[in-house]
Amino acid sequence: MNKPDDFECWRLPDDDSVQKVTCKKDFKVPNAMMIVIEREDHTLGNLLRMQLLEDDQVLFSGYRVPHPLEPAIQVKIQTRSQNPGPVQAVQNALDKLEDELKIMKDSFAQALRDFTPAQQ
């Protein structure tokens, strides 16, 4: 069977043979780059793509999974100009996602405190 072990689909090898994130400049399209993120799937790809599209400076943002048996995503970004460029756009998107997830975590914690019955 060709399917890799489930364990290998989310954990990076111990020998550092695979980098988590790799950035490649796109020489065919101006102000564009591709980010390869290992051991991730549609969950992160779609989340990052949608956050990038919220930025007015981003012309294009898309992702793909190169092959169903390959645990990686490729995110492509193109911005209107080199300043801010695709690297800064990704950094801004990740910062905003981090803020949103913190708000969600705090809201969830508050909801749990409200839900937990008071001890008598």
Image (cartoon, rainbow, N blue to C red):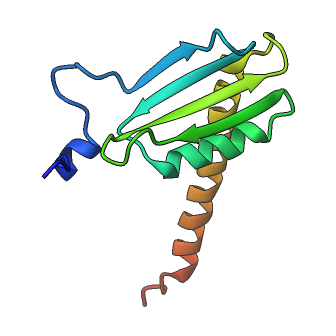
71 relative to 116 in the view: left or right: left
Task: Give the answer, above or below, for where 6 lies relative to 20.
Answer: below
In the rendered view, tell whether residue 17 sits above or below residue 46.
Answer: above
Indicate the position of residue 94 as horizontal and vertical percent values.
62, 34
* Residue at figure coordinates x 44%, y 31% from the top left: 37
**Residue at 36% from the left image edge and 48% from the top image edge:** 68
Percent coordinates x, y for residue 51 in the rendering? 70, 42
Numbered circles on residues, count: 0
Q: Is residue 87 above or below residue 94?
A: above
* Quarter holding residue 21: top left
Which quarter of the image is occupied by the C terminus? bottom left
Which residue extends farthest bottom?
A: 120
Is 59 positioned to the left or the right of 88 in the image? right
- The answer to which of 14 and 46 lies nearer the viewer is 46
Which quadrant of the figure has residue 104? Answer: bottom right
- Residue 112 % position (x, y): 52, 73
Q: Residue at horizontal 69%, vertical 20%?
A: 86
In the depicted view, which residue is nearer to us: 116 or 35? Answer: 35
x%, y% of residue 93? 68, 34
